[in-house]
Image (cartoon, grey):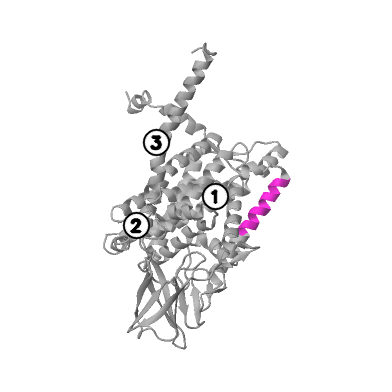
Amino acid sequence: MPATPTNPDRRRWLDWVLGSWFAGVCGAVFFPVVRYLSPPEISEPPTLTVKAGPAATLAPNTGRLVPFGQKPALVVRLKNGELRAFAGTCTHLACTVQYRPDLEHIWCACHNGHYDLTGRNISGPPPKPLDSYEAHEQGDEIVISRRT
Amino acid sequence: MSIRTWLAERLPIDAVQAAIDHKTVPLHRHSFWYYLGGMTLFFFGVQVATGILLLLYYRPSSAEAYDSVQFIMTRVPFGWLIRSLHSWSANLMVAAAFIHLFSVLYLKAYRKPREFTWLSGMVLLFITMGFGFTGYLLPWNELAFFATRVGTDIPGAIPVVGDAIVTFLRGGPDVTGATLTRFFGIHVAVLPAITTVVLGLHLLLVQYHGMSVPPSIEDEAARIGRPVRVMPFVPHFALRDLFGWMVALALLAGLSAYLPWELGRKADLFAAAPAGIRPEWYFLWTFQALKLVPGHVLGLEGELVAISVLSLGALGILLLPFLDPNTTRSRRVVNWLASAALLFMAVMTIWAYWGGE
């Protein structure tokens, strides 16, 4: 191959065509791969209300974790008998929180995050409060629902 | 015609033999640290062998993973041993890799012309952490489940792309069976494939450059006007290496037999994180630091600040050969920084162990 092409325009054009072709092949290979790696979004109707177990077995000053759609929710019966419910996922790094009867508030074991009984983050690393849900008794059962 | 002559006509045996005959290792008061790379490689070999054995019985789904590991540990002959060896060797490999890293750092083996050896070594360390993190989830127990929830949630604090990274890592918005399958694929196929290439490059570069002689030893040799003493690689160094591996094997076998790795309780997606939950010892210092950073620092989310500091630290250490101008003063600065980092990691680790809540 001559060091200086006899027809530089033609060489440039060929380079451009081959370059574009190569870029096209790379795109055609990598686009499906990258898309394949991100999981499909499963569209599920948002959970609005769930049954959270029998009311009689949730004693004052205790809590219970229940599934709320794909995520956990925490139902707490206060000392005065009042029911409260919160999202069970810590706002810090997504561990599942629990009710601590000795502290009388909500606690996350992973990084020692504390929330009061309105869901407000009061100590430790959590940056945001827990979402709170409506909780009430319906017959013998506790029912919790997303606030609208 | 002898078999050797027959082979030598077809394979570059003579060239390899000549290279082995000529290979030497510097002999001085810091030579001990030359064995740590080989030690890491030994534990890696144990991981490959035991990992392949575990693959014969392990089932990578959220419904079956825990039970299959329990089956390996209780029913398969010597299954408890193979699984214990795999877990203990993983821990010892991380420990050996860390000691190797810090010895290379203190002895300034990363300086010109070994920048790429350092870079490939750092990549191997990151891959090792990746192996540890993905492998930890595979038994699908409670500890692993929460460790993975926390670990995969951390990139979520990165602005703009954070959520996409979390979804990519978990194979969905939450840690589920999809995460387990994904981690399994990464643990047994993706990371081993990358490791093969990077480890090959790392070993090739070590052979190409030979062992680095620390600046202090070089200076001493120059002062007294004598070259640094050497020993032949075969058999002197190789036999010492082999002896080290035997000690490592004895330690590994002892730990696996007398302190078999526990399986814990099966993961429950809707149970609270148990009190006293902690990650593996090599992530403890990060865990303690994350615990101490408040919700907000200077108006920014504490988590984001913590990740930024950690990422900058990791980037700094990765690019160390290019940041250190290799003067007497810069070497002292690097030593101080490394000691400060070690002290910080040690204090955080001890705090996490004995600090309680």
Query: Circle 1 — which element?
Result: helix
Query: Which residue bears the numbered disc 2?
Result: B82
Tag 3: amino acid: Ala
Distance Cα–Cα, label 1 vs label 2: 26 Å
* Mark closest to the chain's N terminus, 1 or 2: 2
Q: Is residue B128 above or below residue B18?
A: below
In the rendered image, residues at marks 1 and 2 fall on the same chain? yes
Locate residue A129 relative to residue B273 in the image: left or right: right
Q: Residue at x 47, y 41 (%)?
A: B198
Q: Which quarter of the figure has residue B177?
A: bottom left
Query: Which residue bears the numbered disc 1?
Result: B100
Query: Circle 3 — which element?
Result: helix
Can you give x and y, in whole percent of width and height, for residue B103 in the image?
58, 50
Q: Is residue A139 above or below residue B337?
A: below
Please provide the residue range marked out in magenta: B329-342
Residue that protrudes farthest toward the bottom in the picture: A80
Distance Cα–Cα, label 1 vs label 3: 42 Å
Locate residue A142 relative to residue A123 in the image: left or right: left
Can you give x and y, in whole percent of width and height, for residue A104 in the image?
50, 82
Q: Which is the main secondary structure of the residues drawn in magenta? A: helix
Query: Circle 2 — which element?
Result: helix
Q: Is residue A55 above or below residue B173?
A: below
Distance Cα–Cα, label 2 vs label 3: 43 Å
Query: Which residue bears the numbered disc 3?
Result: A28
Tag 1: amino acid: His
**Can residue B250 be seen at all in this image of the molecule?**
no
Mark 1 crowd level (few <14, some 14–19, many ≥20, 10 Å Cα): many
**Can residue B196 be seen at all in this image of the molecule?**
yes
> Closer to us: mark 1 or mark 3?
3
